[in-house]
Image (cartoon, grey):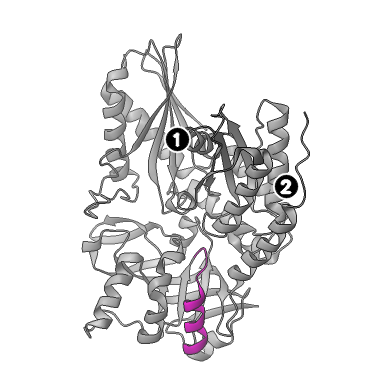
Amino acid sequence: MVTRELMVKALVEGIRVATIYLPPDVKEALKRIYEKEESPVARAQLKAILKNIELAEKLKAPICQDTGLLSFYIRVGAKFPAIDLVEEAIVEATRVATREIPLRPNTVDPITGRNPGDNTGRYAPVIVWDEVDPKGDYLEVTIVPKGGGSEYVATLTMIPPGRGLEGVKEVVLDAVVKAGAMPCPPTIIGVGIAGTVDKAVSLAKKCAVIRRVGSRHPEPKIATLEDQLLEMVNELGIGTMGMGGRFTALDVHVDYAYRHPATYAVAVVFQCWAARRATVTIKPTGEYIVTQ
Amino acid sequence: MEYRLKTPLSEDDVRRLRVGDIVYLSGVIYTARDAAHRRIIEYIREGKRLPFDLSGGVIYHCGPVVQKKDGEWIVLAGGPTTSTRMELYEAEVIERLGVRMVIGKGGMGKRTAEACARYGAVYTTFTGGAGVLAAQAIKRVIDVYWLDLGIPEAVWVLEVEDFGPLIVAIDSTGRNLIEEIVEESNRRKNELLKRPLVLPP
C-alpha cells in the first residue's frame, strides 16, 4: 500500500541519489571529452571535475554545494492510488532531505529576503505535473536539483517568424556566448521552440534537464539540427569553465511545439556539467525503485 | 606555471602570477557572497571596523553546505559561486581592505581587473561545481561571522591546504582570460552566423 510515509521515504532516497551521484550518461560524456581535450587549462579542470565526481560517490556527499532549487517532474498513472498525497509528500521529503543529506537551504522569499531554511516556500519546491498516463497505476517522479548558476543565464526571445531555424541558431549562439563561463560549462543546452512563451521555456527546460546526453530527437531533421548546433557551440571555443577549449557543451537538445502564425518563441536553458537527476518510481503495492 | 602559495599573501606573491597559471593555496580564506559584500561595503563607508582582517587576505565566492557535528562546523561541499554578482563591490574591497586574491568562478569585469592591476591582486577560479573536491582541501572551519545572513551568505573562515587547482583568470598586468575567451568566441560566432545550417528536408 502507498502511504504518505512511504512516499516521503522513497522521495528522500531519490533526492539523495540525485544530489550525490551523476547519471551514467553525463559521467561517460565528461570522461570522453577529458580524453579528447587538448587545452591544459581545460584538462586541469576536467580532471578536477572527474575527481570530484569520484569523491562525492565515495564520501556520499553532495556533488556540488549548490544543491539547487529542487524541481520534481511528475508522470502519473491515472490509476495510481495516492495522487492526493503526492504534493504534500514532496514538500515533506524536501524538508527531511534538507536536514538529513544535508542540502543547502536555498529558497528565499523574493519580497522580504527571508530564507525559511528548509528549501520550501510559496511554489517551492517546484512541482510540475508533467504527464498523465491514462492506463498506468504508478507514480514516476524525476528529481532535478539544479544550481542557480546555470539557471541564471537562460534566455527567451521572440524572433521574427520569417527567420526560422537560422534565427533559432543565432539565438542559441548568442545565448552561449553571453552565458560564457557562468553556467559551469561543459553544459547541456536545451532549446524550445513554440508559439507561447511558457511552452517554449518548459520544452527547453526538459531538453536541458531530463533528456539523456547523446539522445536524439526522433525526427531526423531536428536530430540533425541538434548535431549541427552542438558542433557550432563547441566551435565557439568557450571551453570548460569558460577558460578556452574544444568542448563548451556536452550536448544540445531541441524540441518544438506548433506555433501561432505571428509568434516564434525560442527559449534556451542551460544545465551545468553537474547535471543531476534521478527518477523514483512507486508502484501501487508500495514497492519503489530509484533509477538514473 | 604552477605555484604553491601560503596566506597571508604579499604583493610580490601575486604580482608574479599570470593568467593561465595554476595555484594551490594553503592558509586561511574567507567566504563572501552578495550579502556579505554589501555588509563589508557598509562597514567601510561608515568607517566601522570589520570583525576580521582581510589585508593580504583571500576572499572566496562560496556558499557552502555545512553541518554541525559535536559543536564543530564541517564543510561538506564548498565549490565556488558565480562571481559576476560581486563585480559591484570587489574593486572597492580590494582597494580599501588590501585583499590579494579573490577566488570564484565565471569571471569578473573591468573594474575588478583595474583594481587588481593598481593595488596588486589576482582573481582566480576554482572549478565550478567541484564542491566535494573543495571540501577535501578545507581542513577546518576556524570561525563564522554574520550567520544572520543565512548559511550560504555568512562569512566562513576556513583553513585550507593545497586548495586548488586555482586558475589565474585576472592577473595584475591587466589581462582578463575569461573576457579574452568571450571576445574570441564572439568573433567566431559572427563567422558561424555566415555558415548556414544544412538540414534534411
Q: Residue at x 42, y 60 (%)?
A: B78
Where does label 1 land, which residue?
A198
Q: Judge by depth and name the residue closer to the eye, A52 or B125.
A: B125
Residue at the location (63% across, 73% down)?
B20
Residue A231's disc is: 2
Distance of mark 2 from mark 1, alpha carbons? Answer: 28 Å
Q: Is residue B76 left or right of residue A194?
A: left
Secondary structure type for disc 1: helix
Q: Is residue A209 above or below residue A180?
A: above
Q: Chain of mark 1?
A: A
Q: Are dots 2 and 1 on a single chain?
A: yes
Q: Amino acid at mark 2?
A: Glu
In the displayed structure, would residue B102 be above or below residue A204? Answer: below
Q: Is residue B9 visible?
A: yes
Q: Nearer the viewer, residue A133 or A19?
A: A133
- Residue A3 x, y percent position in the rendering: 28, 19
The boundaries of the magenta stretch are B105-119
Q: Residue at x 37, y 74 (%)?
A: B89
Identify the residue at image location x=64%, y=49%.
A170
A101 sits to left or right of A267: left
Inspect the image, locate mark 1, and give the three-letter code of the amino acid beneath it.
Answer: Asp
User: Of callouts 2 and 1, which one flags the residue occurring earlier in the amino acid sequence?
Assistant: 1
